Image (cartoon, helix red, strand yellow):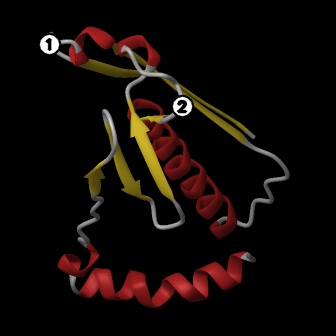
Amino acid sequence: MKSEDLRAVQAPLKERYRETPAAALITLSAQGRIGEGVSCKVQTGRALVVAGLHPATGGSGQTACSGHMLLEALVACAGVTLGAVATALGIELRDASLRTKGDLDFRGTLAHPPALEVTRRRTSA
């Protein structure tokens, strides 16, 4: 997408949000359904993902880890934002990579207070 194309698409949205700030507030939602064993089926909009226990809590490793999914969502958000801002400013990104790491205390899934701390984020362009 070219800078002028993105600006043309976003201009009416920016104007609308300036005139009616409440219009910019959108509730996002996700839903899941308990699956077989200890799992949850989550519809992502593109595919059905089955999330289950991480091996550190007794999982088989055959299902997606919800902690990984959370970090993947953060990376996706940052990547889309980076691309949109670069496009709007007319900056050509030939290559960029994003990485997020989080420290998860798995005792939290074993009846102790849970803790997930996203401590390291890196973007390379």
The residue pinned by badge 2 equals: 62
Q: Is residue 121 above or below residue 80?
A: above
Q: Where on the picture, by quarter, is residue 104? A: top left
The residue pinned by badge 1 equals: 111
Q: Quadrant of the C terminus?
A: top right
Task: Locate residue 107 relative to residue 9 in the image: left or right.
Answer: left
The residue carrying pointer 2 sits among few (fewer than 14), some (14 to 19) or many (20 or more) residues within 10 Å by Cα, namely few
Which residue lies at the image location 38% right of the left edge and 26% below the top edge? 53
Task: Locate residue 64 relative to residue 66 in the image: left or right.
Answer: right
For numbered disc 2, what is the local secondary structure?
loop
Task: Locate residue 95 relative to residue 72 in the image: left or right.
Answer: right
Q: Is residue 118 above or below residue 27?
A: above
- Residue 2: assigned label: none
Which residue lies at the image location 45% right of the left edge and 60% below the top edge? 44
Residue 59 horizontal/vertical position (percent): 42, 21
Marks 2 and 1 sit apart, C-alpha to C-alpha, by 23 Å
Q: Earlier in the sequence, mark 2 or mark 1?
A: 2
Q: Choose between 67 and 24: the one closer to the eye.
A: 67
